Amino acid sequence: MRFRTVAAASLALLLTGCGSGSWVSDHGTVFKGTTGRTVPVELTSGQRFSLAVPAGGTGWSLADHPDPVVASYITEELDGGTAYFVFNAKQKGQTQVQLRDCDPCEGAPAGEAAFQITVK
């Protein structure tokens, strides 16, 4: 009997998506990027935001993390043909995030998108 209770509780946690890298229900303010262009992103401290790129190609990845004092990375999600990289704005400052379209990158990437983040 005790085993069933523990098993049921474990299953409930698994289904609700608890844990690192789990699906988030709020992408926050979405900023759409395109290959070869730098997108300006202006935020206030504490604001959740996503950097979004079309999910076609070989696979988008975070080429470099932002300055953790300015913005913190939460997770990456694929939803409806769009890759979302979700962050929280932290303290005032500027940082840049670059996304790279390749999996794995052995040569030149298929594309890159850059975002200039400013937290006010």
Image (cartoon, rainbow, N blue to C red):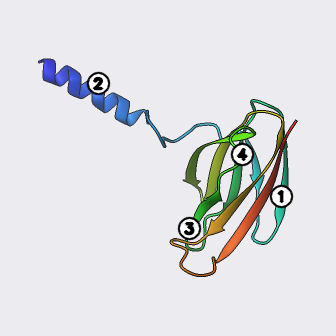
> For the residues marked 4 and 1, what is the alpha-carbon distance in whole angstroms?
17 Å
Q: Going by the image, does 13 lie left or right of 61? A: left
Residue beneath disc 4: 67
> Which quarter of the picture shows residue 119?
top right
| Residue furthest bottom as drawn | 107
- Kindly identify the residue that appears in the image at 53 percent across and 79 percent down: 106
Q: Which callout, 1 or 2, points at the residue further toward the start of the chain?
A: 2
Pinpoint residue 48: horizontal percent, then vertical percent. 71, 36
Q: Kindly indicate the quadrant of the structure image that contains residue 105.
A: bottom right
Disc 1 residue type (three-letter): Val
Distance between the alpha carbons at the discs numbered 3 and 1: 20 Å
**In terms of sequence position, does the residue under pointer 4 or pointer 1 come before the other?**
1
The residue positioned 83% from the left and 35% from the top of the image is: 92
Q: Which residue is mark 3?
A: 59
Helix, strand or loop for disc 3: loop
Nearer to the camera, 91 or 78: 91
